[in-house]
Amino acid sequence: MKDLIIQGKTALGIEFGSTRIKAVLVDYDGHVLASGSHEWENKLVNGVWTYDLADVDAGLRSCYSSLRKDVEAKFGVTPKTFGAMGISAMMHGYIALDKNDKQLAPFQTWRNTNTTQSADKLTELFDFNIPLRWSCAHLYQRILDGEDHVKNVASVFTLAAYMHYKLTGQKVIGIGDAAGMFPIDSETLDYDSDMVRKFDALLKDSGLTYGLREVFPKVLVAGDDAGKLTPEGAALLDETGTLEAGVPVCPPEGDAGTGMTATNSVAPRTGNLSAGTSTFAMIVLERKLAKLHREIDMVTTPSGFPCAMSHANNGTSDLNAWVSLFGEFCELMGVKAEIGELFGKLYTHSMTGDSDCGGLMAYGYYSGENITFINEGRPLFMRTPNSKFTLANFMKVNLYTSLGAVKLGMDILLKDEGVKLDRMMGHGGLFKTPLVMQKVLAAAVNAPVSVMATASEGGAWGIALLAAYMADGKRDGKLEDYLDKRVFTGLTGNVVEPDPEEVKGFEVFTKRYIAGLEAEKAAIKAMDW
């Protein structure tokens, strides 16, 4: 492995997640050689969920430094080059630059739901669901709001496309990430031309001189050449100056596309669920959906296959906050509790709770939730006087509610649309505790759920695989062929079948979840401090 690093026959993947930036170095068969990370957090500034772009640069350098030190510790060498690399990040949002690459407005992340008017108008115009967090909804909302900066917009990026641009100078984007900016035509593997024409007419009517294709990045698919690391990009990435320019860079992708890749869920009738700060489930489709659903996003795999997504803005934030509270209690009692052990014990204990969570209810709504059409959030825990208020049920309801909104979208796909699902894969940090979240997810979708040992590597591993595919994997054929033949051959994972009693209990929870949304709405109205 040391020789591969010296020769540069490796692939580097870096993903900007909601709370952590992670880097993974792999060989061309996907074996993890080293990793690094940097913790960070979004901020609510003047009502906008955002990250300072200076923190983006600093986080990138810190993450790469962490990876470089891991390589040096394990192999005694400092990497000077790679066979390929790639950047991934949280999808959607709005980063607007002028012709001199100056930032024009605060970076709006996927978490913002301040685009209702725009999303509604575009959905009606296109007859295609435009979620609140999509980049085109953000741009058009800024126009509707009369923001002065829109006349100077020269580039609109997602976070992944922005960082790719800074590292390579290329204004391009992977098709999966592009599908969170604007609707994609899976036949042409590009932005839908009819919808582009309609959107450009809106821009012209608003007095703007540019069109969508001028300001949005060019769409590429898995395996395409997306440019090379420039000297400026290498200096931004590696503060020691050791890393050389010229590294080929694959198309930047969103966390949905890297999640599909990391779980080998890029072929029709396969699905995956990524559980983190936001939680989303995806199924690769055999056919178009019968009708438009505002709860369902239509996106694509990194190769361009149509994919239906049930995306919840709120996932594990409130769950993590409760576990931290229990950690404080342990400290107060003089008990030293390592955070990983605390998560593991509490999650495992939840499995002894009642299948319907004993009548408890919780909403981890830190922000608005598009699936339930709620534009603001208030974390909320509720119970009735006759509910079974035990620690197991309390933890179980918080695990269940992390999938609550996603479950509503999945029910539309599996029950109403009759979408076929042969395999569901789980990944992300929530699956680190063995079996627990698998059982919860299996109960939610009433289907077998697999989790591999690589599940916790998540999207950073996924974008590293996409880089490796571009560098060496295309000789195996399509992306799914490379994954099947080279990466996932011999990899086994735990498979959990749905427990009928737990399935029944999750259905009861879901009915209560829907009914309790009125309390969430009332909390938003009442708690305005």
Image: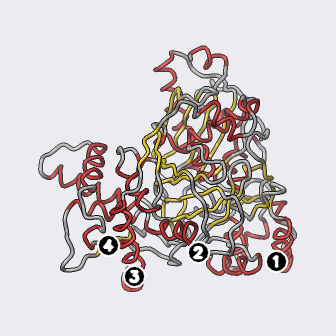
Numbered disc in front, either 4 or 2: 4
Q: Position of residue 495 (x, y in %)?
A: 44, 45
Would residue 168 appear left or right of 313 to someone viewing this image? right
Mark 1 residue element: helix
- Foreground: 230 or 228? 228
Amino acid type at image mark 2: Asn
Mark 1 vs mark 2: which is more N-terminal?
Answer: 2
- Foreground: 120 or 432? 432
Q: Identify the residue under disc 2.
A: 114
Numbered disc in front, either 3 or 2: 3
Mark 4 residue element: strand
Q: Position of residue 226 (x, y in %)?
A: 77, 41
Numbered disc in front, either 1 or 4: 4
Amino acid type at image mark 3: Ala
Numbered disc in front, either 1 or 3: 3
Would residue 393 appear left or right of 452 to someone viewing this image? left
How crowded is the residue under tag 4: few (<14 C-alpha within 10 Å), some, or many (20+)? many
- Foreground: 30 or 212? 30
Mark 4 vs mark 2: which is more N-terminal?
Answer: 2
Vertical arrangement, residue 454 with respect to residue 446, above or below: above
Q: CA distance from mark 3 to mark 4?
A: 10 Å
Q: Position of residue 385 (x, y in %)?
A: 19, 80
Please say if the residues under marks 3 and 2 sit with CB atoms less than 8 Å apart. no
Q: Identify the residue under disc 3.
A: 515
Where does the C terminus fall, quadrant-wise? bottom left
Q: Identify the residue under disc 4.
A: 361
Q: CA distance from mark 4 to mark 2?
A: 27 Å
Q: Kindly give the residue lying farthest to the front in the view shown.
A: 500
How crowded is the residue under tag 2: few (<14 C-alpha within 10 Å), some, or many (20+)? many
Vertical arrangement, residue 14 with respect to residue 500, above or below: above
